[in-house]
Amino acid sequence: MKNAIEIRRHFASDNYAGICPEAWAALAEANQGHAVSYGDDPWTARAADLIREVFETNCDVFFAFNGTAANSLALASLCHSYHSILCHEIAHVETDECGAPEFFSHGTKVLQVPGANGKVDPAGIERMVKKRSDIHYPKPRAVSITQATEVGTTYSVEEVKAVWAKTKSLGLKLHMDGARFANAVASLGVKPKEITWQAGVDVLSFGGTKNGTHVGDAVVFFNRDLAGEFDYRCKQAGQLCSKMRFLSAPWVGMLQDGAWLRNAARANAMARRLHDQLEAIPEVKILFATQANAVFADLPPHLIVALRQAGWKFYTFIGQGGCRLMCAWDTREEDVDRFVADLKRLLIEAPRDKPLGPVDHRKLT
Ligand SMILES: *Cc1c(COP(=O)(O)O)cnc(C)c1O
């Protein structure tokens, strides 16, 4: 049995990682006796207070099961069904939520805005909004940006503010998909408030899962007027956990002594280590600046096949192509070094002439 346990850390996703010790300890502590259900328990109150402390403001906090729900319900709360949401063309809300934002908003259309490095171009927002003003076009109502982005870059404070300036002038609300918000904060070295409410963010999906909890992402309304009846929205969508303490307690564990930022900094540092080693290999081309916990790289096709045959798991369909190598809170230096050692060895040893055939990347990962 012991031998069957795979202890290798992969680079497929930060959600391959388990639960971090701080979150696990809080779960165990919360698992004593009875507590009031549906969020009226001390753990949930404490978690929400800690989030208010982190952001240094009196925001409204809700917990949903995952990021798709957090994003979709947050966006739905900003829009009517005849509105539209503008986001980057590779944004998770557009490409990886199976239409959940449209579903939970009863038809609000997601419109794609281009931009370099996975970031929405403020001029693109204006173009998209001003393109049409007639009744036949879904009325733009909100912009969603992802921090850190889907390609492992971050928006600087100035860049978030530039998006805000556009949204404000065009009468749009601003949502931030922060599935990797912690990685962005750790990387930018800013206070959480500087890239959220002080930069115009109305509502944040604050990710915990990829950073070390088992389940449960937070929806944080800085613009509290928008939070009205959000609890009903969560309940109707099946997102009100009856044993809420088990969604919120891990947040207490993560936030109370800074584990959330330590975890993120560690993942970022491992991505930096991986980046630096890969950059030195001529056959490898780094595709995006490594500003959070992901490295995107072009690898020769024979090498991708060989690495996977050697048991390494990673995605090749996320973002704008290339291989996505994602580090987690528990990625170790030796995991990075072992991966790079295999990569260097296979670069030489692996057969180059084997026909690849059609590759289903999702099945391979
Ligand atoms: C992982 C992720 C989410 C949330 O995904 P779930 O699987 O629904 O938890 C949201 N946005 C981004 C950018 C993500 O990477």
Image (cartoon, rainbow, N blue to C red):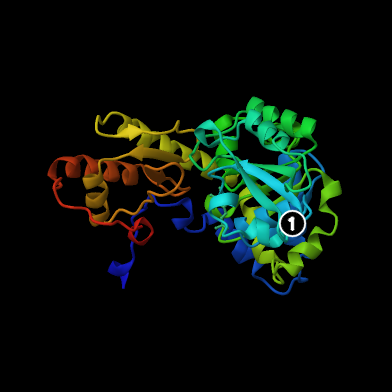
- Element marked by disc 1: strand
Which residue is under mark 1?
62
Q: Nearer the viewer, residue 351 or 1?
A: 351
- x 71%, y 54%: residue: 108
Q: Residue at x 47, y 51 (%)?
A: 14
Q: Mark 1: few, some, or many residues within 10 Å (few <14, many ≥20)?
A: many
Q: Residue 29, position in %: x, y? A: 63, 64
Give the quarter of the figure containing the N terminus. Answer: bottom left
Picture coordinates of residue 307, whole percent (x, y): 25, 50
Q: Disc 1 marks which amino acid?
A: Phe
Residue 38 picture location, percent across and down:
76, 69
Depicted 157 relative to depicted 64: above or below: above
162 or 48: which is nearer to us?
A: 162
State whether label 1 is within 8 Å of ligand 1. Answer: no
User: As drawn, is 337 to the left or to the right of 219?
Assistant: left
Which quadrant of the figure has residue 229?
bottom right
Residue found 73% across the figure and 74% down from its top: 34
